[in-house]
Image: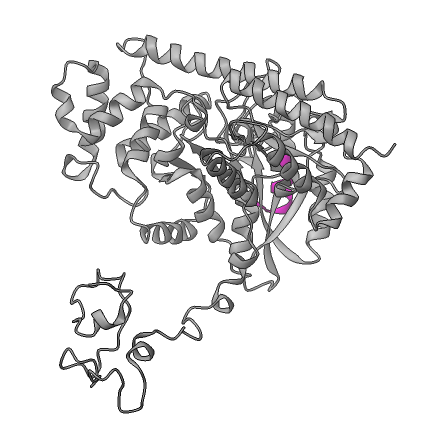
Amino acid sequence: MDPSNFQSMKHLKLCESSSCTDLPGLDTGDLDSPDFNGVEESGSDSEGRSDEDILTMKPVESKVLTVDMVNEGIKVMTYAVRGPLLIRANEIEQELKQGVEKSFKTVIKANIGDAHAMGNKPITFIRQVMAIVTCPSLLESEFFPEDAKLRAREILAGCRGGSVGAYSDSPGIEIIRRHVAQYITERDGGIPADWRNIMLSSGASEAIRAILKLMTNPGIVCQKKPGVMVPIPQYPLYSATLAEYGMEKVGYYLDESKGWALSSSELERSIREAKKRCTVRAIVVINPGNPTGQVLSRKNIESIIKFAHKEKLFLLADEVYQHNIYSPESKFYSFKKVMMEMGHPYSSLELVSFMSCSKGYMGECGVRGGYADIINMDPDVMGMLQKSISAKLCPPILGQACLDLVVHHPQPQDPSYSNWTSEVQKTLNSFAKRAEMVANILNGIEGMRCNVVQGAMYAFPRVMLPERAIEAAREVGQTPDVFYAFNLLEETGVCVIPGSGFGQEPGTYHFRTTILPQESVLMDMLDRIKRFHVQFMKKFSDN
């Protein structure tokens, strides 16, 4: 039967299965024979309509769900990391596959910190255990080391029915939560962590969203919109989530001239201005920084804790890059450790810290594993949080398993320890080398300035754009940094994210690039950026 020939469809009976979605929709209300509501063989009905008129669907005038019904927060939210530049980069990739001639052969997507997509190899032990828990018959295989099998048995014993295909408790598998608490205790020099306050999550992002969702009600005392302080530049998850939840983003600027450090006076300025328009509930700190790559000093952390205590703010510490420290002068301090060592009254501050297996040396972005360590939360609010996350059933079990292997990794007595430490150190050393390479080369380009990449996975260089380039951007309705990034993509195939997607001081222009491409690809990318920048500056020179 040919669906394009309406005559051949006259005796078609409607499918009883809902899978027939490729056929025209028909009104079955009066169908009691294959003659379609009395359609005669003459080709017209009693009202003089032809078969073609009857079988041609009129376009629906309006959908039931329309844009004006959509949450206003979703309408205004943006997420620059996966925005128009990435969409265009994907289109260019397809054009290259179709044989379209360009001045480059490949697209380099430096827009996101996706380690494995950039060719970085997974840690063997993590994948061995994840393979076994997915296919338990591998426990009988001689191919896997005994400690990998032992770890797999521990995880499977914590799963209902001994299967990673079963649901877990909403906060996660108990044995894994206990391991997370042990990891935090050891990391913080013996300061205890309570496993009952550990919430596992689908990556750190979902845990962050779950905590922010608790703060959306304006409250009884003050009816102003709730606000959250976030660093500028910031990871767009925060601005997007606050927009979606109808909350106010309260930006505080990091000081680029001082290696993206934070000053108490800037915090005071930010909250003073914000109080005129919203009720500030919380402050977010990203350490090590994304997109800026800085590592906060202990003194900086102490000043933030004192500020949060003075202003009665809930503190969210995004610490997903805690393993990614490259500068010899830098050291990671957890907010929990510093807060507890400061003693009363600061040790009673309400704090949630976040960690993920997507970053660090692991780079397991796709398995979606993370945790939140919840400290000093009101018991009634904790009950609300538990109720909220229960509606999502549970985090992915394989993500929980992956996280378990990060916080409960091989020890010196284990067969896999030597290979584990070798792979981890090799990965982190390579990241450190690439971080130094990126900053050095970008700083060698005239009209560009980049701070040392102390940690995390990104550089955030400043571009000194000439006035003619700024005017050209305005003429096409783009911000100058977006204009620069789109030109870079079209002419070189390098996809970076403009600084406006993260926030930046007015009158300054930046872009974020990841340091994760393999060294040969990274050198190629930096060479493309350099050649483009020289030509761009020459083209738009004010001279």
Residue 344 as seen in the image, left or right of residue 154:
right
- Give percent across and percent down for residue 491: 62, 33
Q: Is residue 245 visible?
A: no
- Looking at the rendering, the stretch of residues picked out in magenta corresponds to 304-314
- Give percent across and percent down for residue 372: 42, 38
Please report the residue visible at 66 percent of the width from the left and 45 percent of the height from the top: 251
Q: Quadrant of the C terminus?
A: top right
Residue 309 inside the magenta-drawn segment: yes
Count up the numbered dots. 0
Please report the residue visible at 20 percent of the width from the left and 40 percent of the height from the top: 165
Front in this rendered view, residue 397 or 329: 397
- Give percent across and percent down for residue 97: 45, 34
For the stretch drawn in magenta, the main secondary structure is helix
Front in this rendered view, residue 139 or 446: 446
Q: Quadrant of the N terminus?
A: bottom left
Report which quarter residue 485 is drawn in: top right
Front in this rendered view, residue 138 or 217: 138
Q: Is residue 399 above or below residue 209?
A: above
Residue 405 as seen in the image, left or right of residue 157:
right
Please report the residue visible at 31 percent of the width from the left and 91 percent of the height from the top: 47
Residue 461 inside the magenta-drawn segment: no
